[in-house]
Image (tube, rainbow, N blue to C red):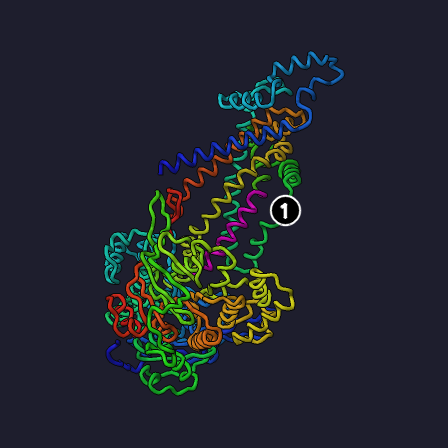
């Protein structure tokens, strides 16, 4: 994207020997937990630099160290951060405040909770100016509205007086970008600025950031875990692993010729938007369908007797032992369909059959729930933090049948082997396990009662690419061994293409198209599907 | 907006009817009644027949259902019946005692809120960590102090020792100083705890970090961004606490010799003066309902996400 490498001799920011740690509980001098160790890198002037790493790599901590806002408890032990001849680690708080916003901007990760809910967009954007100078009210208003227009918001004057909850996620992120660029800073630290957004919105936001920064001559440090974003958008890349710099260099070189083995693993684990290898090809309507959805309509009641139609006339059928993907962005009705599938909602119209049972008559019965189990996106949120893994799994068995303790424990051990967890986790609680391990437990909980259909709601999107690849492999293996049928919900088309046989594309509750993965992805019929595919490549 | 208001008022009236019915049943279930307590004294030498006549004159005869409707319709007309103990209409008693208690409650409420805010904001914004920790521990300590003990201590120290405030022969407002202090501390302490907790919780929200990245200082962030959010749950709690103020009045008024609702209640309980108790219950319930209704109605002024159609937008 960024045209050329303007390697001016002076980098905009130079980090040398940075160390950040959290003091371990029980005293300062006890074992220190270093999250950033001896990190050195520089950010070239102009263009985008990627600070790339998985969770726990220290990338966010480094971003926050630069702007001098480490989370409570974190200690910057040593190192220097040179910004235009100033060592920022030695600046007083007041000097840092003068720098922040004016010379170094920041774009946060999750737009949904990065704006003050009780203040208008205008008040929060205007604050940018009033914090760094004295301006008449009218000037602040005029400049804020101009900025809102510049970041691509329609009706900027109306947006100015709206509250954050009245805007969509993408619009909020535009507001946050407007704030960051308001005073034309020299450097912007963008901390995963698009990971909470839909793929098509993600592209627009990155384009916008790119254009604005080129206009203003701003350099961007893009903190991200997304290899594709780094490859497509940046000209310089720093790869982090476990708080250390793994390698640094021109993005093109790193992606073409990774020097470290770790970078190579990362690149190989990245799901690519290519046809899956080794999956048997199924054609559509097979007779032995495990799940059939016919003309499903799902409405939610609103105030004053009105209703909101979240799902409008959806039909698909899933052959036993295959994977059907539901693809769509937020608000497309994916979650509603899932809730209807597992019997949490009663369909307004249409029918759903799971393993031969009609959902509207059998939902809520044990016999029905035995057939279909749901696994959620966030493994830490869907497991009771007070229970041990053993308790979680035994409870799932006990919900469906009375089995004596020894048999339950046998089933637990058996399922743990199946999902590739050591038996030692039985005594552990979710808080003591990694995201990947927790997701394995969540899968085990779904599988322990031997259902025929597993509904997987974005089960890999919260995981790092390497872990993601492992879980996807596990899912494929389990399907083969147990003949499971999956309903796989995801916004990631590359992942969908790897794991699914058939797919339904949803947009605003309507079915755009449905068919085998390869036919939909190679010859999309709807414009929306084409747009999604363009965003995935 | 208007149907909502109407619905809320209807709701409030239902609560009051519930409070009336419930307290009526409870008061009826109590063994004995005021007339027995006052007139069955052997020294008076009244015959059972005479007592029955007295009962008739107080409207205390007839079935309980008839009494229920008799009392209820009386209340709707503003007639609270007669105090058997003191032989005057309950409304006469209320006219002298209610202003005292309302004044005390209003002062204590305001002072409690000020105390809570002072403690919470200082405990958040003071420069030294040990000072902040000390202040943060204060509400727990203050909340544990019994009102009666603290009231007596205040009289001893401020009035008798330092002679700052007179206890005897004080004017209507002077007389409020010590009781207000005494009752506002235990009321303010939980409020401070709630507010402090909210401030901490809001300060950890991502948007606060974003405000700091814009170059805002700690104090600006606290007062312009954290506080407006933290004040919301505080509002709700302060409404609930107001009820405690009325309940707390019994002890405070007894200690400070104030002739308010609290004293009236205490005497009425001792004498099983049902009409008075019923009136006190209704006044407390009305005050409680009214203040919570007010808080619900002003809530949208503080939180734009709440709309008065009775649903929230997300």
| Residue A27 within the magenta-colored segment of the rendering | no
Residue located 32% across and 56% down the image: A312
In front here: A237 or A489? A489
Say if B113 sits above or below A128 in the image: above
Residue located 62% across and 30% down the image: B26
Q: Name the residue under label 1.
A: B144
Please indicate whether residue B294 sits to the left or right of residue A384 in the image. left
Please indicate whether residue A390 sits to the left or right of residue A6 in the image. right
Q: Where is residue A308 in the image (x, y as percent from the top left)?
A: 33, 51
Q: Where is residue A310 in the image (x, y as percent from the top left)?
A: 34, 55
Residue at the far right in the pictured view: B42
Q: Quadrant of residue B164?
A: top right
| Main SS of residues in magenta | helix
Q: Categorize mark 1 by other alpha carbons within 10 Å: few (<14), some (14-19), many (20+).
A: few
Q: In which quarter of the image is residue A422?
A: bottom right
Q: Pinpoint the chain carrying mark 1.
A: B
Say if A424 sits above or below B90 in the image: below
| Residue B194 within the magenta-colored segment of the rendering | yes
Q: Position of residue A255 (x, y in %)?
A: 34, 83
In front here: A319 or A382? A319
In front here: B175 or A259? A259
Does residue A221 appear anywhere in the picture?
no
Residue at the far front in the pictured view: A287
Rendered-image quadrant of the N terminus of chain A: bottom left
Give the magenta-colored segment's residue range: B185-208
Please indicate whether residue B2 sits to the left or right of residue B186 in the image. left
Q: Where is residue B240 in the image (x, y as percent from the top left)?
A: 52, 41
């Amino acid at each position: 994207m960024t045209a050329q490498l303007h390697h001016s001799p002076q980098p905009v920011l130079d980090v040398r020997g940075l160390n950040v740690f959290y003091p371990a509980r029980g005293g300062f001098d006890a074992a220190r937990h270093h999250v950033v160790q001896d990190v050195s890198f520089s950010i070239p002037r102009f263009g985008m630099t990627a600070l790339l790493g998985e969770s726990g790599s220290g990338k966010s901590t480094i971003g926050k160290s630069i702007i001098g806002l480490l989370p409570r408890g974190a200690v910057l032990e040593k190192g220097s951060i040179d910004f235009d001849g100033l060592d920022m680690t030695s600046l007083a708080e007041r000097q840092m405040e003068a720098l922040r916003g004016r010379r170094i901007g920041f774009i946060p990760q999750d737009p949904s909770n990065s704006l003050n809910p009780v203040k208008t967009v205008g008040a929060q954007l205007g604050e940018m100016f009033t914090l760094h100078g004295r301006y008449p009210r009218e000037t602040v208003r005029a400049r804020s509205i101009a900025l809102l227009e510049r970041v691509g918001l329609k009706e900027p004057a109306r947006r100015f007086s709206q509250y954050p909850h009245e805007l969509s996620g993408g619009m909020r992120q535009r507001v946050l970008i407007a704030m960051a660029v308001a005073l034309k800073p020299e450097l912007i630290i963008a901390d995963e600025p698009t990971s909470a957004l839909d793929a098509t919105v993600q592209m627009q936001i990155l384009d916008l950031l790119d254009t604005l920064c080129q206009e203003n001559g701003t350099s961007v440090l893009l903190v991200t875990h997304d290899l594709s974003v780094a490859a497509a958008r940046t000209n310089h890349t720093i790869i982090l692993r476990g708080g250390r710099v793994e390698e640094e260099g021109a993005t093109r070189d790193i992606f073409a010729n990774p020097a470290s083995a770790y970078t190579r693993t990362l690149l190989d684990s990245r799901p690519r938007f290519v046809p899956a290898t080794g999956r048997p090809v199924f054609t559509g309507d097979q007779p032995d369908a495990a799940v059939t959805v016919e003309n499903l309509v799902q409405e939610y009641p609103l105030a004053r007797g009105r209703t909101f139609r979240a799902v409008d006339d959806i039909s698909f059928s899933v052959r036993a032992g295959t994977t059907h993907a539901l693809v769509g962005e937020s608000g497309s009705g994916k979650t509603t369909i899932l809730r209807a599938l597992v019997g949490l909602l009663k369909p307004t119209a249409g029918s759903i059959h799971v393993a031969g049972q009609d959902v509207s008559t059998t939902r809520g019965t044990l016999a029905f729930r035995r057939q279909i189990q749901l696994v959620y996106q966030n493994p830490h949120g869907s497991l009771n933090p007070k229970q041990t893994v053993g308790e979680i799994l035994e409870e799932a068995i006990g919900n469906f049948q009375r089995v004596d303790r020894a048999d339950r424990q046998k089933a637990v051990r058996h399922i743990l082997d199946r999902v590739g967890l050591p038996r030692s986790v039985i005594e552990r609680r979710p808080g003591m396990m990694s995201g990947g391990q927790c997701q394995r437990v969540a899968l085990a909980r779904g599988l322990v009662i031997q259902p025929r259909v597993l509904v997987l709601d974005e089960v890999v999107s919260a995981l790092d690419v390497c872990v993601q690849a492992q879980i996807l492999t596990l899912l494929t293996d389990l399907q083969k061994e147990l003949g499971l049928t999956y309903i796989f919900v995801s916004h990631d088309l590359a992942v969908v293409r790897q794991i699914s046989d058939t797919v339904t594309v949803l947009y605003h509750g309507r079915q755009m198209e449905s068919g085998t993965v390869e036919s939909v992805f190679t010859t999309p019929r709807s414009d929306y599907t084409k747009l999604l595919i363009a965003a995935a490549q | 907006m208007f149907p909502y208001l109407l619905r809320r008022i209807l709701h409030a009236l239902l609560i009051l009817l519930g409070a009336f019915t419930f307290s009526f049943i409870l008061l009826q279930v109590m063994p004995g009644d005021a007339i027995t307590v006052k007139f069955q004294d052997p020294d008076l030498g009244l015959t059972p027949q005479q007592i029955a006549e007295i009962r008739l004159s107080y409207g205390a005869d007839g079935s309980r259902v008839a009494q229920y409707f008799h009392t209820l319709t009386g209340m709707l007309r503003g007639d609270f019946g007669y105090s058997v103990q003191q032989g005057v209409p309950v409304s006469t008693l209320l006219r002298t005692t209610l202003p005292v208690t309302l004044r005390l409650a209003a002062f204590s409420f305001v002072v409690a809120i000020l105390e809570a805010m002072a403690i919470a904001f200082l405990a958040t914004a003071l420069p030294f960590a040990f000072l902040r920790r000390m202040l943060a521990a204060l509400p727990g300590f203050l909340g544990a102090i019994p009102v009666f003990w603290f009231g007596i201590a205040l009289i001893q120290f401020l009035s008798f020792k330092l002679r700052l405030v007179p206890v005897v022969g004080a004017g209507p407002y002077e007389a409020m100083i010590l009781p207000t202090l005494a009752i506002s501390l235990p009321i303010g302490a939980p409020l401070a705890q709630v507010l402090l907790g909210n401030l901490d919780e809001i300060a950890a929200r991502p948007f606060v970090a974003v405000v700091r990245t814009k170059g805002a200082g700690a104090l600006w962030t606290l007062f312009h961004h954290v506080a407006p959010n933290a004040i919301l749950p505080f509002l709700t709690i302060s409404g609930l606490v107001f009820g405690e103020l009325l309940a707390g009045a019994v002890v405070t008024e007894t200690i400070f010799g104030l002739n308010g609702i609290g004293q009236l209640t205490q005497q009425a309980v001792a004498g099983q003066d049902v009409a008075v108790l019923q009136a006190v219950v209704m006044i407390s319930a009305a005050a409680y309902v009214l203040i919570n209704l007010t808080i619900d109605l002003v809530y949208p002024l503080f939180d734009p996400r709440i709309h008065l159609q009775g649903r929230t937008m997300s």
